[in-house]
Image (cartoon, rainbow, N blue to C red):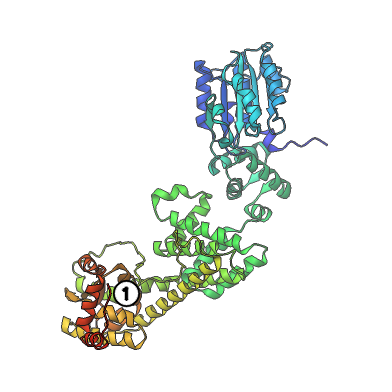
Amino acid sequence: MENFVVSARKYRPDRFDTVVGQEHVVQTLKNAIKNRHLAHAFLFCGPRGVGKTTSARLLAKTINCTQLSEDFEACNQCESCTAFNSNASFNIYELDAASNNSVDDIRGLVDQVRYAPQGAQYKIYIIDEVHMLSAQAFNAFLKTLEEPPPYAKFILATTEKHKILPTILSRCQVFDFHRIKIDDAVKQLKKICISENIQAEEEALHVIGKKSDGAMRDALSIFDRIVSFSGNKITYADVISNLNILDYDYYFKATNYLLSGNLAASLVLFDEILNSGFEAQHFLHGFSEHIRNLMVCKHPDTLKLLEVAPNVANKFAQQSQSCSSSWLLNALNLLNQTDFNYKLSKNQRLHVELALMKLCNLNRAIQLSTHQPMVDEKKKNNVENKPTSSTEPEVVNLMPDAAPILVQPKVELKDSVSSKSTLERLKEQVNKQKELNAQQNTLEENEEIVVEENKSFNLETFNIEWVGYIEKLEKTGKSRLAAFLKDSPIKLIGSEKIEVELKSALESEMMEEERLDLIPYFRKNLQNTLLDIVFIVNKERMQHTTKLTKPDQLKKMLNKNPLLGDFVQGLGLEIDY
């Protein structure tokens, strides 16, 4: 039985032009060899499995080759190349710093540097995982690394550049290796399939490349596993089954169900996913990425961000046409909040199902948020001025009186809130949700207001309703609101806009919350769905509300209630300031 060699070793690059996805590093090294501008120390940094050690070995082999090709590649035929390929070179040393990280190990290496190379131009030392060296070992290495003999070259490799001492970094020529792109990984896998006589679906290779997370070595390891599972024919179904990945079709179906408002089908599909052995959060992550891909398809400039097989990309492009940008944005926000709160939920399945219920009603909420009746009325008035070919984007109005509150808002923690306990923050979220539910109910009530024709009104008519609304506030226990509204000047701007002056930002915040009840009240009573009320803070009035002195406070109280003066005199009281 022949010994099996994994693809990561069998197809390890033996020339610079076969290195995958690191053209910037390869070109720089080849130019340095061509111009004889080789540094004495190199540092290769980057994620795992992207070719750092491979590039270090290729550099070591190439600079000692005696018969370089015209494109400055190693010949693989001279004595030096032959010795290197058979792991018998006396001039190239590899040290694994993960297991040889002591001062004595580095001192032994420094002692070897004194001896000149045998039958070659350079003596090369490759130190892998160099960040694992101890601080003492780094210090013992500094002097040699700064002033080595002319024949000594050091090539250091690390996955954690931030752990390298600055004194080491300043003595090296640093190369940053990139993650392998999915397309580059797929190209390499196709070459291997041709070499190994394996038939593979391109969609399956894309899944392998995506699962490898930018590491070519991981992609080859996954490829070997899939070949062991499915033989010489790799299919998309085999790959997603072996790698425990949800099929794209689940996400396409879920999106179609949610867009059409088919809640029953959505919940049944989610149950099918759970019964297949997938976690609910796994579905959340995949579905969020699916919605992101649909958003990417909405603009030609972002299509390059879609890293899927061509046939899948066509499906995304088709489905994105049926999704509005506002729906995608709100859905992505809702899924993000659901994922954020997933671990806090005791009933996690219900937590995800609730998100699906909200998504099913998202289109209706967006229609409510755009005030469709008012938009239609404006279209009637401006139908001659508006071009018929207008393609304005659909944007969700996030004003408090019109927002479809289906997504829990992100609570911004200020300095004063950062010390609150988790229980208090949860209580705040519950109260916030109650307010959001009240807002949604108000929107639904507002939708039921049917006006055959908007009636005009003047300031006197509005004042009558304004007094009635203040009395309503007093009866419902909102006396504080009623108190400062009595002193707030109001004026009519145009024919349908009322402006109310307030004294402070606090009053403005309170009235913005009250808009949920205030706007529908006046639209219904005045029979005008175009009516709008805005609140402004008058800075001059804020300046006049400065703190009064005690004598001024007494004078103000006496002016409001003259009986207070009689009371003070009758008791013979003296007021001490």
Depth check, front residue: 485 or 146: 485
Asked if residue 254 lies left or right of residue 229, the reply is left
Q: Residue furthest right?
A: 1
Location of residue 552 in the rendering, given as x and y in whole percent from the top left corner: 22, 73
Q: Is residue 458 visible?
A: no
Provide the residue designation for mark 1: 511
Depth check, front residue: 167 or 62: 167
Q: In the rendered view, would you say 276 is above or below 238?
A: below
Asked if residue 572 lies left or right of residue 10, the reply is left
Quadrant, the N terminus: top right
Picture quadrant where residue 282 is located: bottom right
Query: What is the secondary structure assignment of the residue under circle 1?
Result: helix
- Residue at the (40%, 61%) spot, across then down: 325
Picture quadrant where residue 131 is located: top right
Location of residue 114 in the rendering, given as x and y in whole percent from the top left corner: 67, 13
Depth check, front residue: 244 or 574: 574
Asked if residue 293 lies left or right of residue 43, the reply is left
Total count of labels: 1
> What amino acid type should be assigned to the residue bearing mark 1?
Met
Location of residue 418 in the rendering, given as x and y in whole percent from the top left corner: 49, 60
Q: In the rendered view, would you say 420 is above or below 151?
A: below
- Residue at the (36%, 66%) spot, across then down: 396
Q: In the rendered view, would you say 423 is above or below 204?
A: below
Location of residue 539 in the rendering, given as x and y in whole percent from the top left corner: 22, 65
Depth check, front residue: 375 or 475: 475
Asked if residue 150 lies left or right of residue 512, the reply is right
Picture quadrant where residue 381 is located: bottom left
Q: In the rendered view, would you say 480 is above or below 143?
A: below
- Residue at the (72%, 23%) spot, across then down: 87
Quadrant, the C terminus: bottom left
- Residue at the (66%, 11%) spot, across then down: 116
Q: Is residue 540 visible?
A: yes
